[in-house]
Amino acid sequence: MVTIDPPRERQCERCGRVETWDDDTGTWVAGGANDESDRGNPHCVHVWDITGAYNPIGGSN
Ligand SMILES: [Zn+2]
């Protein structure tokens, strides 16, 4: 049995951009609690530091 527990929030390690998951649209939405200041650099190649143990690649499992 596989339990899917996707992250709800992620932050870029490079520019500090914060995105939160929107269930309604099924997409990441820029802007965290501080909104404008959390949008980071639009030209950054974001490296997401995802909260928790979520592994998008699949890892050892
Ligand atoms: Zn970034």
Image: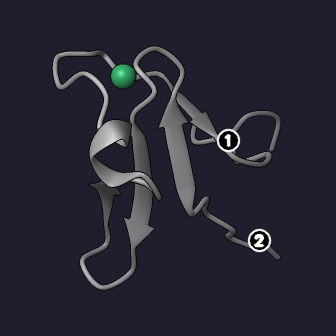
Q: Secondary structure at mark 2?
A: loop
Question: What amino acid does circle 2 point to?
Answer: Val
Q: Quadrant of residue 23?
A: bottom left
Q: Is residue 54 visible?
A: yes
Q: Nearer the viewer, residue 60 or 55?
A: 55
Residue 38: assigned label:
none
Q: Secondary structure at mark 1?
A: loop
* Residue position for label 1: 55
**Badge 1: residue crowd in 10 Å (few <14, some 14–19, many ≥20):** few
Figure quadrant, ligand 1: top left
**Badge 2: residue crowd in 10 Å (few <14, some 14–19, many ≥20):** few
Q: Residue at horizontal 43%, vertical 43%?
A: 18
Q: Is residue 31 visible?
A: no
Point out residue 1 in the picture as x, y percentages from the top left corner: 82, 76
Point out residue 7 in the picture as x, y percentages from the top left corner: 61, 59
Point out residue 26 in the picture as x, y percentages from the top left corner: 31, 72
